[in-house]
Image: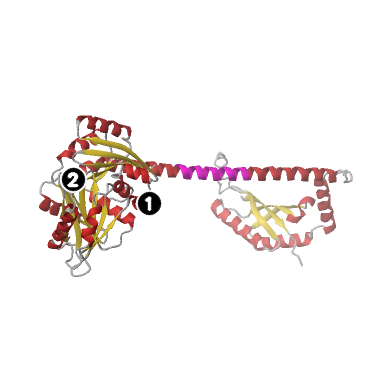
Amino acid sequence: MLDHRLILLATPRQIGVLDWRPGHLHWLGDFPASTEGLAAFHRVVVKHAQLPVLLVVDTVDEDYRSEILPHVQGRARDELLARKLKQVFRNARFTGAWRQARETTGRRDDRYLLAALPDADWLTPWLGVLHRERVPLTGIAPLALACQHLLDKLRIQEPHVLLACRLNNSLRLSYYHHGLLRFSRLIGGDTPTQLPGSAADEIAKTQLYLTGQRILPREARLHVLLLDPGGQLDSAQAPLNADPAFSTRLIDMASLARALRIPDDFLAATPEIAPLAAIAGEAMQLNLAPPELLQRHTEFRWRRGLHAAAGIIALLGTGITAAYWLHAQDLTDQASQMLQQQQQLDARYLSIARTFPIQSAAPEQLAQTVALARQLGSGQPDTGALLAAIGRAIDAVPDITLDKLEWADDALTAGDGTRVSLDASLVPFDGNYRAAMQRIDRFMHTLQAVPALHDVRLRSSPVNADSASTLSGRTLDAGAGESPAARFSLGLRYREARP
């Protein structure tokens, strides 16, 4: 599953591992900060090395600053935040900035929450195990950010909220303005917060600090939420409610389990999973991990994206293949139906054809007989009109002498007219074949101009222009007695004009 991941809760004394995916939680145990604990943690990491990991840190050594910075974007914002983080937190390795909102007045600058872990050397062994096993680290988030998502699950609407959460024998006080983290501090287990009134005193001191730092307005009423699975913070509710600056409410485990949608007995057995279950699946708003620790997760996201794209392409290919297969099956069924229809029509045709009378002649012979009958019935072409048409063309060209004229009327091609063959010669001829060909072309155009004559073509020429022929004969002798002639033959068709 794409959302399957490990969520780690790290403290200077131990680290806890939660195997999370939507609708399923499995607590893998707590591992102390010792050689045996590191070995056991290493075995768990090796077993789940393919899963991304989110590290939630709960430590006293943390620092929060609210800053108003110019509104810039892109590379300029990255450079501005890098300079500001180095200026505020010096050489701290684990730092981060979260752009929470934009001012509505003035220059409309951006309001940032800067956070850092000034002393986090105790994280090095745990991070070393993750690095050696090439585990994709999603990020490092403070526990106060996880508690912010916890408030969102509980649907807390008050503008000024102080969450007092007691986990692992430590008291964490976190202030949220309109649901966004502004400040958090952890009071370690060596501080006697379990004594009557000490938790209320710490909450009052925190309220004074927030007011002095102008994080909390002086006239604002602070809404305090007490979350303690052991019930040791119950005694702080009465003295806080007695102060008009506070309004206090206890968060019972049943309401918390319903908000997180986890079993009551599972939450009662491992109460530290509450903030981890709240931040699971949420976007990283404040990431304290340096870029070099996030390289494996970047590669993991690219690899997962490629796998998802390949899966989508494979799914689309399967769908298209199925569609083409169904279409091919449909075409096959249609072809089978058409073949059956053809066979039925052929059978019907054969059954009907058996009732036809026996034919003594083929259909082609019948067609020729009908054409011949039409030709005989139409009468012979008018010879006088044929000769008159050709004679008018010869009279227009006096240097053409007619040698022979033939015509034929084919009964089966009556629609094409009468075929005419004409043999003629050029008299006189001075031996200039180029001029002779030009005179023949003019004579052909003259014949073509006659309305009854069509398809005039040259059958034989006085000059053999075939490239395969050989040159033979002799030149013209000017002293020869007989007059030379250039003979040629033409073919044409005569069609009588329709009235």
Towards the viewer: 122 or 29: 29
Taken as a whole, is the magenta stretch helix, strand or loop? helix
Indicate which disc residue 258 carries. Answer: 1
Towards the viewer: 160 or 95: 160
Q: Position of residue 395 (x, y in %)?
A: 67, 63
Which dot, 1 or 2, sits closer to the camera? 1
Label 1 – label 2 distance at C-alpha: 28 Å
Q: Position of residue 2 (x, y in %)?
A: 37, 43
Q: Which residue is denoted by mark 2 in the rendering?
A: 59
Towards the viewer: 338 or 250: 250
**Is residue 179 something one can see in this rendering?**
yes
Question: Is 324 on the left-hand or right-hand side of 113?
Answer: right
Residue that extends furthest to the bottom in the rendered view of this protein: 105
Residue at 25 percent across and 53 percent down: it is: 234
Residue at 75 percent across and 60 percent down: it is: 386
- For marks 1 and 2, the one nearer the N-term is 2
Q: Amino acid at mark 1?
A: Arg
Q: Against 494, is 330 above or below?
A: above
Residue that extends furthest to the right in the rendered view of this protein: 357
Q: Quadrant of the N terminus?
A: top left
Residue at 22 percent across and 38 percent down: it is: 14
Q: Is residue 69 magenta?
A: no
Q: Position of residue 428 (x, y in %)?
A: 61, 55
Mark 2: secondary structure: loop
Question: Could you say which quadrant of the image residue 135 lies in?
Answer: top left
Residue at 69 percent across and 59 percent down: it is: 453
Q: Position of residue 358 (x, y in %)?
A: 89, 43
The magenta stretch is 314-330
Q: Is residue 322 magenta?
A: yes
